[in-house]
Amino acid sequence: DSHYCTDTNKYLAVLLTSLNTMLHLELPHINALSKIDVLHEYGELDFSLEFYTETVDLRYLLDTFAGHDDDSDGARSRFNERFTKLNAAMIELLEDYALVNFHTLDVQDKHSMVALLSAVDACCGYPRSDLEAAQEWLAATIPAPEHPAPHAAPTSKQPTAQDILDPMTDLRIFDR
């Protein structure tokens, strides 16, 4: 869930859990931050969303540990001083492996769904073009038009996946 990004301790736990799972299962692995559409309800992020998805330069998290554990007079707490080295070692471990990153998922956004579907397909060894993925996904979600009987009067045309995708052919859905 994306709300883990609002708490540095939980985010570090999610990173370590993902890395542990990736190393022990040795299978294709995709990490997704779900519920991106309601992220603003959980509070402000200390960094941009890209920081949390790309997981580069995690050492900046050390400053947020200090900020969350400050006493009212601004002095560092004993807990923070005691575990600063441990937090730094865990962050160094994550940066050394450099395996964990996240994709965002907003179930109300078709582009987000198609992007995640393409990432899963590529992870499993079935890479394909973004437009092809979008066409297949839309074809599966839009019902096929019914063919009227030969003697029936013409009716209004139901949109097909191709009708919807024609304006989208110039869009670059997945600029990375």
Image (cartoon, grey):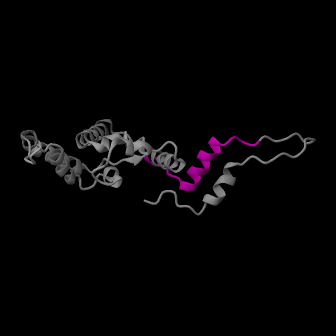
Locate the N terminus and report the quarter of the image it occupies: top left
Whole-percent x, y for residue 130 in the image: 53, 55
Q: Is residue 66 left or right of residue 20?
A: left
Q: Is residue 137 left or right of residue 13?
A: right
Residue range highlighted in magenta: 122-145
Q: Could you tell me how many numbered marks the image carries?
A: 0
Residue sitting farthest toward the front: 73
Whole-percent x, y for residue 112 in the image: 49, 48
**Residue occupying image coordinates x 38% and y 42%:** 41
Residue sitting farthest toward the right: 151
**Residue occupying image coordinates x 42% and y 42%:** 38
Vertical relation: 105 (above or below) 54? above
Locate the C terminus and report the quarter of the image it occupies: bottom left
Query: Can residue 121 be seen?
Result: yes
Residue 129 magenta-drawn? yes
Whole-percent x, y for residue 95 in the image: 23, 51
Nearest the eye: 99 or 34: 34
**Residue occupying image coordinates x 33% and y 54%:** 48
Q: Is residue 94 left or right of residue 72?
A: right
Nearest the eye: 76 or 147: 76
Query: Can residue 92 be seen?
Result: no
